[in-house]
């Protein structure tokens, strides 16, 4: 695929350190200083990671989440050994272990927080590549060539993708990173969360979807980086908002809960949320599962035609979950005039999606992607449509694997929230939401988070992701991310391959 | 008992066909799916296949040119080279040869050994398929045979298959069925190499299908001069497979029936299993094939009457079931128990054309699913000729009628009646049947019945106008009188003149009416009278009034023609000269679009030539014209052009669009300020996300009317189809004078109706044949009303208290109060102004004027715990009053 001219002009936003909001950040290790301490200050001098801050009686362990842990013991600056009073102890943090879940184990959470805070890969012994689910992305590994490949300088590696490949008269839209941010409605998350994602998208010259809860005025300055969603409840959908954007997304289903529409329980429907959706305060809002006007592919085409009529320059994205015939759904969407098809696999969804649906209905994205990719190739239309994968993309490695399995790009959601210090407690829907002020509509809780802070956290994390992607491409000898799409040969599933059979280096 | 033995015998006789399952599985193909556009008509005289073009061209946007097909039933023997006797009794076997070299093998294996062939021939085609524009794949060569099974073959077959219990004709039918099955299995389906398949084998019917659009079938096989009583056509929209085969196109066959299908049902595998248990195995693997297999099973194997077949396909449910007579309940319960697994679940709409050999009649049947998830319109026209039509879209019906009328003026361009079926209902059963049968030698009649056999007819005492005959000139005195009346237009307001004339129309004959229209046409030549004349003519279209012994459709056709003629006198946008009234634009002149000059008020836009959607759409032209400064639009000549009024953006107050003829889907969707008046019936998906402004429909509206609407003031003279106002929020204020099929205002969330929120007034009224307002039998027959609603209100005219709590799930019936009356009165007044339905009409019950409290009932939202998230709601009390 040819380089998109002008893409090199894209200037990455700068990373900036953004410390956590809470006094005691959660880390893998817990550092304690005992009464034996004489406050000599040696540990403060020694620790290059700033774990300690000066205190009146003894140093304060201010940031033990920055501690290297036991692996520091080989270093000359290992405070535990060097402390003249042997007052310092490092232990595994018992709270850490109970964080998260199998898909988002504590190390993945902590490494994501680290990236969001520092804009750097974690130096601690944290696994930032995979989770612990025992399957799918967590069992898939890259195979890097052993021999040195013709190497492209990192600065020359393009991570840009084209969103309109149809060849129609609508604008071509290139995004410099192969990802954008998925729909989370105003109501499901706070206005600060929403805005921070949008602003991060704007800084990265990519897009962020509004979700199905209207188009708050605060978003207007970022119109060019917004995908507005037309979902089954049609909440907040107006001609004016459709006209405003460059991409309109139809949400047919979410991989986390196919067969269910969006839902927002009554408690989160505050007056402002209700006003935005023009519904009744305090009453839960259930979007129907299907579009009541779409029960077949020609209805779908008509639906797409309608939006195209309202906005004659917008691209149309169709978000579907992954039923067994997802390949046919994709082809149908293409023929109905979609530019982008977003395949939403079964792992996604925040805490609001019911567990029974989240884990049991749709097809995992790792199955859906190759199925769709191959089928589109057979049909001869693979290069006419942009396939975006979503539903459980947690890391740069997940992203790269999704591309190798046939996606052109990915769509992200939960990772953003983790960057904002979500601890994956799964209570997004209950009461007025989130104790961390992310997925809430409560005014007081919303104020827990500052917009600048949140924006930069998200930017920081994705800057690291992009760097990781570039380094993967470099190791594979690729000069553009578009070369990675559908390269089943550069990945392997640990359960189905013997290491000795691999011609290359299996990236464990 | 005899029927049961026969059914068992036939099922057992197919035991060996299970081999097909293994063969088909080996090929590893899966069921295909896709949407479609369907159309069909039945006529008491045979008409050319050309007329099926018009609707199918209209419905290109419902197909993708990957599969089209036609079926014709009730044919002309001479055209086929046989006599009537042969046509009636022989099986008309049509075999498509995808690979022409297979002919000898096919005939040796499947024709010669078994059949007495009365006549055989290749179907004539155009010389080169590439002469037909857009046709990319060569359609198959088709050979036609008129066959009867050799008596000795039948004897052997009966014995071998254990069919002793069956009468001869049934054995022969079964032989035809099985022979076709074997042919398809051997030459089409199982081996994967698709060489030949049977298109049709029924009596007095034939099917043709290709990879392409339906009308290309008619063109390629030269059906221009091929006449039949019933035609059905299908545009397929398959989504799978790079190489398409005509075998996958509709119609599919049972024995003497052809079925086209719009939809995609969810339980294909369940239905397939049900069929397999009865030794029926699909070969073409589409849901359409299994649909017709179920139909054939119920019809020919089980011997069910049509009503029971329809019940098995679309079972009566919920409240509708309770409304059935007890005896029917007993039978239906058994049908449902036995056949529920064979009942297609999900969105589907079937059109079936068949020859009923035993009763010597032809039938066109339309059946909708119980949730009415696919669009469907029925129409009936009677007069010198009689025709019944079934289509996905009303505009396709009008296109067929226009095409027929152009060739034969005995057809009118407007049907006497248009209606929707209510799926699985006790009212009509969700199905209508048009039957063509010889009533006396040489004379065929068309009757329309619903599932239960109730006849749908036109008022017989009202005479239609024969447009072939010139109307006699009026005596000068009468003309002068009329002239003085129309002259009044310059002095009086249009409404006043209409009101004063309204009573007279009943007494006028066609000639006088015609003269009246001529005088109006002449008057419209004066620039400042164009507006009033058009206004008066629009009222003649829009309002209901007594026409005495004249047929309303004839009057509508005359008025419509007059209006169109007047529109066509308006100078084009690129003509020179100063014009006071407005300018006309059409497809050819679209590039000349410019803003209005000083005096130009109205843009008269001819939608006819525009594609229904896309960058060159009519809707786009109108919104572009708006951006150039036009504020008044008269749009006519619609043939289903979609999205009218869309794309204007916010704050389009002060804009008015008047739309005539067959407007399209999604009209007025998203409008925010402007006003649209639809002079006639409207189609599906009107007023989606409608924000503000006004929509007036002088007729019925289709499916999912005002889905997700946020506001607006909306008046509908007639009925709404399924799911109106679903998920509507904000403050829509809607008057529906008729009723809705079902699911009205589901998930309605339109705030507090007494405090700026939204509501729907449902009047449950209709008009009798004299144009007088009369109540419907019940105002709302559906089983679901206001389900899961959390805001807004419904005000239902229900003086006999027919709405019951069982219909509501989330709503509650409250007493209708004075406050309610105050709230709705302004809307009823506007309703009166627009439609002539007076508040007195509404408050009159059985001839006695009542108080509003006795006539209306209020349905409001109750807090459901499922909608409020349980007990936690108490915490949020501080919210109340904040809005």
Image (spheres, grey):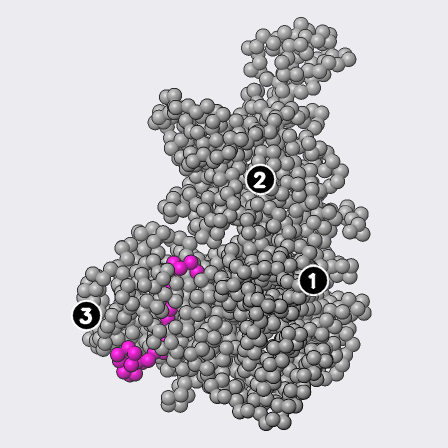
Nearest to N terminus: mark 1 or mark 3 = 3
Identity of the residue drawn at 44% across and 66% down? B57
Highlighted range, magenta: B63-88
Dividing the image into 4 quarters, which one contains the N terminus of chain B?
bottom left
- The residue that label 2 is drawn on is A207
A110 and B572: which is toward the camera? B572
Secondary structure state at the residue bearing disc 3: loop
Identity of the residue drawn at 43% across and 25% down? A152
* Cα distance between the residues tagged 2 and 3: 69 Å
Secondary structure state at the residue bearing disc 2: loop
Pointer 2 with pointer 3, Cβ within 8 A? no
* Cα distance between the residues tagged 1 and 3: 76 Å
- The residue that label 1 is drawn on is B654
Q: Which mark is residue B113?
A: 3
Query: What's the chain of the residue with tag 3?
Result: B
Identity of the residue drawn at 58% across and 83% down? B518
* Cα distance between the residues tagged 2 and 1: 36 Å
Q: How many other residues sit within 10 Å of disc 3, few (<14), some (14-19) or many (≥20)? A: few
Where residue A107 appears, as percent x and y from the top left, is 57, 27
Direction front: furthest residue: B577
């Amino acid at each position: 695929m040819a380089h998109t001219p002008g893409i090199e002009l894209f200037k990455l936003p700068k990373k900036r350190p953004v410390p956590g909001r809470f006094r005691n950040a959660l880390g893998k290790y817990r550092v304690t200083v005992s009464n034996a301490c004489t406050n000599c200050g040696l540990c403060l001098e020694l620790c290059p990671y700033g774990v300690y801050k000066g205190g009146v009686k003894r140093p304060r362990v201010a940031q033990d989440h920055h501690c290297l842990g036991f692996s520091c013991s080989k270093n000359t600056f290992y405070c535990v050994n060097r402390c003249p009073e042997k007052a310092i102890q490092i232990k595994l943090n018992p709270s850490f272990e109970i964080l998260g879940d199998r898909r988002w184990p504590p190390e993945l959470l902590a490494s994501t927080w680290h990236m969001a805070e520092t804009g750097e890969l974690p130096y601690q012994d944290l696994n930032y590549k995979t989770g612990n689910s025992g399957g799918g992305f967590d069992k898939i590994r890259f195979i890097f060539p052993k021999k040195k490949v013709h190497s492209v300088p990192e600065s020359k590696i393009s991570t840009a993708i084209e969103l309109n490949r149809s060849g129609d008269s609508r604008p071509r839209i290139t995004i410099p990173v192969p990802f954008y941010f998925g729909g989370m409605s105003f109501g499901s998350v706070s206005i600060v969360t929403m805005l921070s994602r949008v602003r991060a998208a704007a800084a990265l010259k990519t897009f962020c979807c509004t979700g199905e809860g209207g188009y708050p005025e605060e978003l207007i300055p970022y119109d060019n980086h917004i995908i507005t969603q037309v979902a089954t409840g049609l909440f907040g959908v107006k001609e004016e908002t459709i006209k405003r954007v460059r991409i309109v997304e139809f949400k047919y289903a979410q991989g986390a809960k196919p067969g269910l529409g969006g839902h927002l329980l009554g408690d989160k429907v505050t007056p402002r949320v209700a006003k935005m959706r023009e519904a009744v305060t305090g009453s839960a809002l259930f979007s129907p599962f299907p579009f009541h006007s779409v029960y077949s592919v020609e209805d779908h085409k008509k639906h797409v035609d309608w939006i195209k009529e309202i906005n004659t320059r917008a691209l149309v994205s169709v978000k579907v979950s992954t039923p067994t015939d997802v390949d046919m759904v994709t082809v149908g969407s293409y023929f109905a005039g979609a530019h982008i098809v977003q395949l939403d696999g079964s792992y996604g969804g925040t805490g609001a999606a019911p567990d029974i649906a989240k884990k049991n209905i749709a097809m995992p994205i790792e199955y859906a992607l190759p199925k769709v990719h191959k089928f589109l190739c057979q049909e001869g239309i693979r290069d006419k449509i942009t396939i975006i994968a979503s539903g459980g993309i947690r890391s740069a490695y997940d992203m790269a694997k999704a591309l190798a399995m046939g996606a052109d790009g990915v769509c992200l959601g939960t990772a953003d929230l983790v960057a904002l210090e979500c601890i994956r407690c799964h209570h997004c829907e209950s009461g007025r939401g989130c104790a961390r002020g992310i997925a809430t509509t409560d005014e007081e809780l919303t104020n827990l988070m500052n917009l600048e802070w949140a924006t930069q956290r998200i930017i920081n994390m994705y800057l690291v992701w992009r760097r990781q992607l570039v380094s993967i491409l470099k190791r594979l000898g690729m000069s553009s991310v578009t070369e990675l799409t559908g390269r089943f040969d550069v990945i392997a599933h640990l359960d189905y391959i013997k290491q000795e059979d691999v011609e290359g280096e299996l990236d464990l | 008992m005899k029927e049961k033995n026969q059914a068992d015998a036939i099922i057992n006789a197919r035991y060996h066909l299970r081999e097909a399952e293994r063969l088909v599985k080996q090929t590893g193909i899966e069921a295909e799916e896709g949407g479609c556009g369907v159309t069909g008509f039945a006529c008491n005289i045979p008409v050319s296949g050309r007329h099926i073009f018009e609707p199918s061209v209209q419905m290109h946007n419902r197909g993708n040119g990957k599969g089209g097909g036609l079926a014709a039933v009730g044919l002309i023997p001479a055209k086929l080279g046989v006599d009537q006797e042969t046509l009636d009794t022989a099986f008309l076997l049509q075999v498509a040869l995808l690979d022409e070299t297979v002919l000898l093998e096919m005939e040796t294996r499947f024709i010669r050994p078994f059949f007495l062939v009365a006549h055989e021939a290749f179907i004539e085609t155009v010389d080169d398929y590439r002469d037909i524009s857009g046709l990319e794949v060569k359609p198959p060569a088709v050979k036609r045979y008129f066959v009867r099974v050799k008596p000795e073959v039948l004897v052997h077959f009966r014995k071998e298959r254990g069919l002793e219990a069956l009468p001869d004709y049934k054995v022969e039918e079964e032989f035809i069925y099985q022979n076709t099955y074997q042919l398809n299995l051997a030459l089409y389906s199982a081996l994967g190499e698709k060489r030949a398949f049977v298109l049709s084998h029924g009596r007095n019917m034939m099917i043709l299908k290709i990879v392409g659009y339906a009308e290309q079938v008619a063109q390629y096989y030269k059906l221009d001069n091929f006449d039949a009583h019933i035609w059905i056509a299908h545009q397929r929209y398959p989504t799978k497979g790079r190489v398409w085969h005509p075998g996958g196109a509709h119609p599919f066959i049972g024995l003497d029936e052809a079925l086209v299908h719009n939809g995609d049902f969810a339980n294909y595998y369940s239905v397939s299993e049900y069929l397999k248990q009865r030794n029926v195995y699909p070969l073409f693997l589409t849901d359409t094939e299994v649909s017709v297999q179920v139909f054939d099973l119920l019809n020919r194997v089980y011997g069910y009457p049509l009503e029971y077949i329809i019940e098995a396909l679309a079972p009566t449910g919920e409240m509708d079931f309770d409304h059935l007579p007890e005896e029917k309940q007993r039978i239906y319960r058994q049908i449902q128990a036995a056949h529920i697994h064979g009942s297609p679940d999900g969105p589907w709409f079937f059109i079936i054309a068949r020859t009923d050999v035993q009763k010597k009649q032809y039938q066109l049947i339309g059946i909708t699913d119980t949730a009415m998830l696919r669009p469907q319109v029925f129409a009936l026209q009677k007069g010198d000729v009689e025709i019944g039509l079934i289509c996905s879209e009303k505009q396709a019906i009008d296109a067929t009628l226009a095409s027929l009328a152009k060739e034969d003026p005995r057809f009118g361009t407007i049907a006497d009646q248009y209606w929707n079926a209510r799926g699985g209902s006790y009212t009509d059963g969700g199905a209508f049947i048009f039957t063509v049968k010889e009533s006396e030698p040489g004379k065929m009649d068309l009757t329309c019945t619903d599932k239960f056999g109730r006849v749908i007819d036109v008022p017989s005492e009202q005479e239609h106008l024969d447009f072939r005959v010139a109307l006699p000139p009026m005596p000068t005195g009468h003309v002068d009188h009329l002239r003085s009346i129309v002259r009044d237009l310059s002095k009086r307001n249009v409404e006043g003149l209409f009101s004063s004339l309204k009573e007279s129309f009943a007494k006028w004959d066609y000639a006088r009416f015609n003269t009246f229209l001529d005088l109006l046409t002449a008057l419209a030549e004066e620039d400042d009278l164009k507006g009033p004349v058009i206004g008066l003519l629009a009222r003649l279209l829009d309002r209901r009034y007594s026409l005495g012994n004249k047929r309303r459709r004839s009057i509508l056709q005359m008025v419509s023609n007059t209006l169109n003629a007047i529109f066509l006198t308006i100078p084009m946008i690129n003509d020179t000269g100063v014009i006071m009234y407005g300018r006309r634009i059409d497809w050819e002149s679209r590039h000349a679009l410019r803003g209005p000059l000083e005096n130009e008020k109205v843009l008269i836009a001819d939608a006819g030539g525009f594609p229904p959607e896309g960058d060159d759409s009519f809707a786009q032209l109108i919104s572009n014209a708006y951006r150039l400064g036009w504020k008044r639009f008269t749009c006519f000549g619609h043939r289903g052009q979609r999205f009218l009024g869309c794309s204007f953006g916010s704050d389009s107050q002060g804009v008015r669009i008047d739309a005539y003829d067959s407007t399209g889907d999604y009209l007025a969707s998203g409008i925010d300020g402007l006003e649209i008046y639809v002079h006639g019936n409207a189609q599906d998906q009107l007023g989606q996300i409608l924000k503000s402004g006004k929509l007036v429909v002088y007729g019925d509206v289709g499916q999912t009317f005002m889905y997700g609407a946020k506001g607006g003031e909306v008046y509908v003279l007639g009925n709404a189809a399924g799911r109106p106002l679903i998920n509507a929020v904000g403050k829509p204020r809607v008057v529906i004078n008729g009723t809705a099929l079902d699911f009205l205002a589901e998930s309605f969330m339109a705030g507090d109706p007494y405090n700026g929120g939204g509501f729907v007034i449902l009047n449950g009224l209709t008009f009798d044949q004299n144009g007088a307002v009369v109540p419907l039998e019940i105002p709302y027959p559906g089983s679901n009303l206001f389900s899961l609603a959390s805001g807004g209100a419904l005000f239902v005219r229900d003086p006999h208290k027919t709405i019951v709590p069982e219909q509501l799930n989330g709503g509650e019936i409250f007493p209708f109060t004075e406050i309610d009356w105050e709230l709705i009165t302004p809307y009823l007044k506007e309703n009166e102004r627009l439609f002539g339905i007076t508040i007195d009409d509404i408050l009159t019950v059985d001839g006695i004027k009542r108080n509003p409290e006795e006539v209306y009932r209020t349905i409001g939202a109750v807090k459901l715990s499922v909608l409020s998230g349980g007990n936690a709601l108490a915490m949020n009390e501080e919210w109340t009053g904040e809005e």
